[in-house]
Amino acid sequence: MIATQNGLSGAGVDNRFIITARLLPITIEQTATAPSKTVAKLSVNIYIGDGMNGTLFSSTELNVQGLGNDKSKAYLNAIRSISPTNPNIQAAVEKGCQGIINYYDNTSASIISKAKALAQSGKHDEAVNTLASIPSNCKDYVLAQDLIASYGESAIEEVNLKLLNRARAIWSSSPTQEGAAQVRNVLCAISYPSSNIQNKVRELTNEMSAHFKEQNNKQWELLEKESQRWHERQMKQIESKRELEKQRLQNFHDRPVASIIGSIFGSIFGGPSSRNYRCNW
């Protein structure tokens, strides 16, 4: 709570600086009341410093007292009585913060150089984390934030480019409806795309649309050809039937009248064939 309310728990990732406390019991007594209570008087020493090299920036000592049913609860209530706004704590925090700021003022140039080297090697996330350790009170804070914005964009661009390349690989290996669905899922993972990424995504989706349009056109052409062939087959069948009918009629007209009459009478009366009939007219 002391660190949070006094701005010592920032968003950076550098954990080298610490704020810690040591408790020393002064007296532990029992009250004369019934039931008996425990009274604990403690000396609380608070330290702020560099946990990596052991440099102490500031410290303060407080005497607190707590009452409880037992020793543990008395200790806990004594600690809870410490206020983050205590003047001694405020003074120690202010001095400790100045020690942290002095550290970064002296080392921010090397931190920025390290971050630039990481970014040049493609480690944009590490570069951003390194720069994020520089606090807002430091003289190079604005520069660090500008670089964070730049490297953050580069990191996003790198991730988006990997997603785009993955989508292209899927489409190249499977230019189908199923492949298009997989591509769509991958492209949906792209976030904050730059104009370059947007153009590349548009190129890919246009390529996919053209592919399916061409495929649909080919299917339409096949349907038209199949329909034409079916029509031609039907016309041939009709023409064949027409020729057969013409031939049958021609054969009918070419038969002698007597033969025709004989066939008619034969079919009606079940009599002899046409060759037993003679026409005398």
Image (cartoon, rainbow, N blue to C red):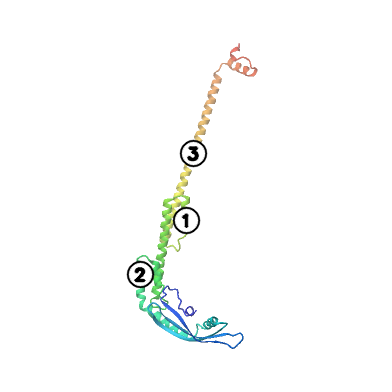
Residue drawn at 43 percent across, 78 percent down? 18
Q: Amino acid at mark 1?
A: Arg
Q: Earlier in the sequence, mark 2 or mark 3?
A: 2
- Residue located beneath label 2 in the image: 116
| Label 2 element class | helix
In this view, the residue in front, 72 or 243, is 72
Q: Provide residue 13's location: percent of width, then percent of height.
A: 42, 72
Q: Residue at x 44, y 52 (%)?
A: 208
| Discs 1/3, front | 1
Instruction: Give the residue pinned by disc 3.
Output: 226
- Residue 142, position in %: x, y? 40, 75
Circle 2: residue type: Lys
Secondary structure category for the residue under label 3: helix
Circle 1 sits on which residue?
Answer: 184
Left or right: 194 with respect to 35? left
Q: Quadrant of residue 104?
A: bottom left
